[in-house]
């Protein structure tokens, strides 16, 4: 597992992280309107309480600036196949533009894969663009087919 520099800290998303730029760091991924502190809190509480031990959002914090610089989530899908097996889904990986290419994305993927493994998943999967494929290969993931989507 890669070391982080002393000024950075990796930890679970916390209930007060709206004010530490959680939404802003997700802007590296897509357009993310800020839902506001209350709606953000409601969503945070929903994923903690409605589905305990299912959603594991994590962040990397710049300790000096008290600001989030990277984030990602793994959520556990409970299956009937594979002897009632669990499948980890990695979602919404984003590293602040100013600190991309310094190994933070890889560190997030290592942590999320570790969480999924530790919770007993028989596999961990993710969807990505072709552009990001080399990044995930460097993180130990293999090409495994085609994603389909139907957007509303
Ligand atoms: N093409 C080729 N190699 C890459 C790429 C790329 N697009 N991105 C990273 N790498 C390589 C790096 O050079 C590095 O190689 P090395 O170990 O030999 O030095 C290795 O992959 C690890 O790179 P990191 O420095 O950890 O990458 P970074 O911190 O920039 O994170 C990420 C990568 C998450 C793609 C980041 O650039 C980002 O946030 N991009 C915009 C949002 C995005 O596309 N997120 C992923 C969506 S897919 C999903 O969420 C499941």
Image (spheres, rainbow, N blue to C red):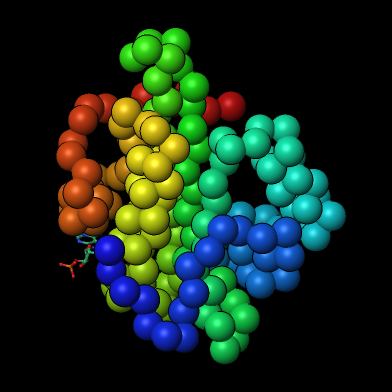
Horizontal relation, residue 14 to residue 27: left or right: right
Residue 74 image point, x, y percent: 47, 43
The C terminus is located in which quarter?
Answer: top right
In this rendering, does residue 77 appear at all?
A: yes
Q: Is residue 43 visible?
A: no
Question: Height in image: 144 above or below 102?
Answer: above
- Of residue 86 and residue 134, the one placed in the foreground of this image is 86
139 or 83: nearer the eye? 83
Numbered marks: total: 0
Which residue occupies the foreground of this view, 43 or 25?
43
Q: Residue at x 28, y 69 (%)?
A: 2
Image side of residue 52 versus residue 128, left or right: right
Q: Position of residue 136 (x, y in %)?
A: 25, 50
Q: Residue furthest right?
A: 38
Quadrant for residue 54, please give it: top right
Position in image of residue 82 (x %, y %): 34, 14
What residue is shown at x 52% (from left), y 57% (from top)?
58
Ligand 1 falls in which quarter?
A: bottom left
Residue at 52% across, 80% down: 62
């Amino acid at each position: 597992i890669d070391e982080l520099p002393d000024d950075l800290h990796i930890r679970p998303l916390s209930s007060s992280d709206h004010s530490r730029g959680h939404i802003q760091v997700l802007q590296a991924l897509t357009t993310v309107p800020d839902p506001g502190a209350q709606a953000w809190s409601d969503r945070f509480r929903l994923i903690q309480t409605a589905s305990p031990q299912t959603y594991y959002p994590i962040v990397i914090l710049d300790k000096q600036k008290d600001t989030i610089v990277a984030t990602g989530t793994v959520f556990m899908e409970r299956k009937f196949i594979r002897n009632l097996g669990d499948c980890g889904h990695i979602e919404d990986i984003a590293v602040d533009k100013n600190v991309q290419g310094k190994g933070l994305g890889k560190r997030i993927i290592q942590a999320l894969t570790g969480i999924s493994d530790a919770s007993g998943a028989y596999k961990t999967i993710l969807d990505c663009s072709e552009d990001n494929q080399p990044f995930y290969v460097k993180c130990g993931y293999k090409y495994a087919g085609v994603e389909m989507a139907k957007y509303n």
